[in-house]
Amino acid sequence: MMVNGVKFNEYSSVVVSAGYDQSLRAWDCRSHSTEPIQVIDTFADSVMSVCLTKTEIIGGSVDGTVRTFDIRIGREISDSLGQPVNCISMSNDGNCILAGCLDSTVRLLDRTTGELLQEYKAHTNKSYKLDCCLTNTDAHVTGGSEDGFVYFWDLVDASVVSKFRAHASVVTSVSYHPKENCMITSSVDGTIRVWKT
């Protein structure tokens, strides 16, 4: 089975994988079992990305949904974005979810209500799994682009505040440092780069 993403819980006791087989699977890191402790298979297409809170597993799928599973009470909430979702990430305050979609749009959702709060455009994302995230202050959204650029948008008004050529080819991953003003990017050109912002 092809795995599209993995995340540890905050105690590093469980890891959750997002799979091409349309499922999220939770694995106990303390046991030597080859069987998952939980399988969530309500998606209709490949699950591309996963986020975790203390009590929830959140998955983004090519079926166009972001689904939140409350593991305490067994409840599922599904938000349909109408476009294939290839990346999700959570705001640092935990109140919002960013969803990168294959229509060259990053969408900001209220995590509690699912309300669409903002859309970020100008980059190209039609064929590749590209990451997006918020900066450590939650003031800006950043994401890679298929043209080799990294984009920064103002969180509130969605204007492009900065962009720069980061790689010779598609920028597949961006990750912003939790405290410092720097980030790391990777590309299909085979390079990983660290940037001061």
Image (cartoon, rainbow, N blue to C red):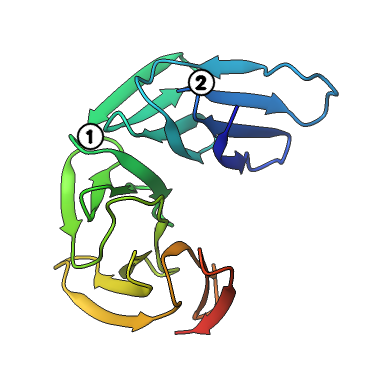
- Return the residue nearer the eye: 102 or 169: 169
Q: Height in image: 143 above or below 20?
A: below
Label 2 environment density (alpha carbons within 10 Å; few <14, some 14–19, many ≥20): few
Q: Residue furthest right?
A: 32
Name the residue located 16 percent from the left edge and 55 percent from the top edge: 118
Quadrant of the rendered structure where residue 82 is?
top left
Could you tell me the amino acid type at mark 2?
Ile
> How far apart, in angstroms, are the residues tagged by discs 2 and 1?
18 Å
Q: Residue 157, image x and y in percent?
A: 14, 68
The reply to whether discs 2 and 1 touch (Cβ–Cβ < 8 Å) is no
Name the residue located 37 percent from the left edge and 25 percent from the top edge: 45
Name the residue located 20 percent from the left edge and 75 percent from the top edge: 160
| Horizontal arrangement in the rendering, residue 35 relative to residue 148 (left or right) | right
Q: Tell which circle, 2 or 1, labels the residue nearer the N-terminal end.
A: 2
Residue on which disc 2 sits: 71
Q: Height in image: 60 above or below 106?
A: above
Name the residue located 37 percent from the left edge and 19 percent from the top edge: 76
Q: Height in image: 40 above or below 143?
A: above
Q: Residue 196, image x and y in percent?
A: 50, 86
Could you tell me the amino acid type at mark 1?
Thr
Q: Residue 158, image x and y in percent?
A: 17, 67
| Horizontal arrangement in the rendering, residue 107 relative to residue 6 (left or right) | left
Q: Secondary structure at mark 1?
A: loop
- Return the residue nearer the eye: 44 or 107: 44
Image quadrant for the C terminus? bottom left
Residue on which disc 1 sits: 113
Label 1 environment density (alpha carbons within 10 Å; few <14, some 14–19, many ≥20): few
Q: Height in image: 43 above or below 81?
A: above
Labels in figure, total: 2
